Image: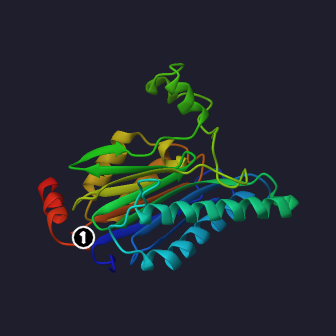
Amino acid sequence: MNLQEKIAILGLTDTGMVRKKNEDTIGFDSALGLVVLADGMGGHRGGEVASGLSVDTVINAVQQKLPSIEPGQIDPDSGYSLESLCIQEAIETANQIVYRTAEENSDHRGMGTTIVVLQFYNNTISLAHIGDSRCYRIRKDQLEQLTKDHSLLQELIDRGFYTAEEAKNSMNKNLVTRALGIDPVVTVDMQEDIAIKNDIYLLCSDGLTDLVEDEYICLTINRFSDNLEEAAKQLITKANQNGGKDNISVMLCKINDDFSTKKGWFSKMIAWFD
């Protein structure tokens, strides 16, 4: 199914006010309902190389494999859909490529990247991530963070050293505990959920979330829910007004219509949530 008419997808990225180059990379395939964002780090040009390689690899791998997957198939070992395993394998392939590239080029030694991948299919999402780039969902005007950061700060919050409020002023904000390309093998966090008409999904780098409060993000997206480009521009502008200390990437996806591949009880259940 071509999802281009079912789901609106928009992405913008900005260097910010301090950095000389943009090490974030964004990409999507509207027809497949695939959205990818990566925030690179390390080495001479290493960050942009790592993020660019990762996004390109994931998109190419999913483009090759996803169309051959029959909807509704579940892997008996993992319990995940084949669509979820498709993006997981694509990220693992990207990890191997970035790691090998860094090993073979001393200028890129130690480079890595965060990554967050969102795949829409059959009124469902598969969400995968590594690092502290995030995915949020706005449903019925309420903002919910779907991903959990792989960061030192998040670990300290989990252990009770910080409250969420205290963490906003911490100096440990940008220390990630897991990144793509640093080790030959990486663990990908995976989740699946139902997608509902009028849901809006936000993928973003920490250049946004470090400088813009959740309340402002929610209000802005709700205000411009019919104009995703303007919503993204407003969020980037706000981050830059607040200092623009990092690259800022914003990707927005709005579900405009049912995109179930099989009508019946599943579609009726989705309609009940709508």
Residue type at the position of mark 1: Ser
Q: Position of residue 35 (x, y in %)?
A: 45, 65
**Residue underneath mark 1:** 260
Q: Residue furthest right?
A: 106
Residue 103: name its quadrant: bottom right
Q: State the SS at label 1.
A: loop
Residue 67: name its quadrant: bottom left
Q: Residue furthest top?
A: 161
Please name the residue shown 47% across and 51% down the image.
190
Please name the residue shown 43% across and 65% down the image.
82
Q: Is residue 133 left or right of residue 199?
A: right
Q: Position of residue 128 (x, y in %)?
A: 48, 54
Viewer-proximal residue among 117 and 253: 117
Viewer-proximal residue among 185 and 231: 185
In the image, residue 84 sits, relative to residue 188, either above or below, namely below
Q: Quadrant of the C terminus?
A: bottom left
Please name the residue shown 74% across and 54% down the image.
111
Q: Residues within 10 Å of mark 1 (few under 14, many from 20)?
A: some
Q: Position of residue 222 (x, y in %)?
A: 26, 53
Please name the residue shown 41% across and 39% down the image.
213
In the image, residue 184 sits, relative to residue 157, either above or below, namely below
Q: Is residue 36 visible?
A: no
Q: Position of residue 124 (x, y in %)?
A: 31, 61
In the image, residue 263 sits, relative to residue 156, either above or below, namely below
Viewer-proximal residue among 214 and 65: 65
Colour style of the rendered protein structure: rainbow
Q: Is residue 5 left or right of residue 63?
A: left
